[in-house]
């Protein structure tokens, strides 16, 4: 049992799952009363992301800001700040580009890459809510 626990902890450390230290946390609720939790943090190194503008121009952004988002169903993902295709707010995207989180003042939205109703790969909104608690610094 101890060996299995030690192996699991070592695997988490290697995967980088234990390296996230939240600096600030907030909770958002939707119209159904479901809650999304987001922890905001900063990495020690820059993370680079690219964005293709509507004109086709590729732009690069470097940032140390990241979030850990936990959806109402318990699914969580770690995402880094990236170029925002929306007119306002701050966008975060996972390395595999499967998830995006958009924060805009007291509102937030979470998106998952999926097939849209037209049969195309796109980001589909899975949560939209308003802040119900936060921000709290270092869990206080």
Image (cartoon, helix red, strand yellow):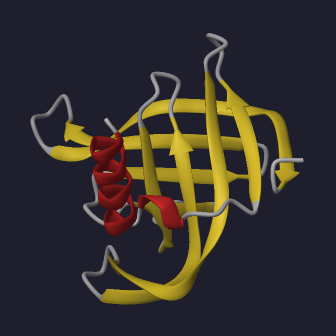
- How far from the left and from the top, in percent, is residue 117? 19, 28
Residue visible at 37% across and 60% down in the picture: 94
80 up-or-down from 4: above or below: below
45 up-or-down from 86: above or below: below
Furthest residue to the top? Answer: 32
Apparent side of residue 49 relative to residue 110 in the rendered image (left or right): left
Furthest residue to the front? Answer: 2
105 up-or-down from 94: above or below: above
The quarter of the picture where residue 89 lies is bottom right
Residue 92 appears anywhere in the view = no
- How far from the left and from the top, in percent, is residue 40? 67, 59
Q: How many numbered marks, from 0 up?
A: 0
Residue visible at 90% across and 47% down in the picture: 140
- How far from the left and from the top, in percent, is residue 42? 63, 74
Residue visible at 63% across and 46% down in the picture: 38
The image quadrant where one finds the N terminus is top left
Residue visible at 75% across and 63% down in the picture: 23
């Amino acid at each position: 049992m101890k060996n299995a626990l030690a192996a699991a902890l070592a695997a988490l450390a290697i995967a980088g799952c234990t390296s996230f230290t939240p600096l600030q946390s907030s909770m958002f609720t939707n119209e159904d009363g479901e809650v999304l939790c987001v922890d905001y943090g900063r990495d020690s190194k820059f993370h680079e992301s690219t964005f293709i503008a509507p004109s086709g121009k590729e732009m690069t952004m470097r940032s140390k800001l990241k979030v850990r988002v936990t959806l109402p169903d318990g699914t969580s993902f770690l995402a880094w700040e990236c170029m925002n295709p929306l007119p306002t707010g701050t966008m975060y995207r996972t390395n595999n580009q499967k998830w995006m989180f958009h924060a805009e003042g007291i509102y937030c939205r979470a998106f998952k890459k999926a097939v849209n109703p037209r049969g195309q790969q796109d980001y589909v909104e899975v949560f939209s809510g308003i802040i119900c608690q936060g921000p709290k610094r270092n869990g206080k």
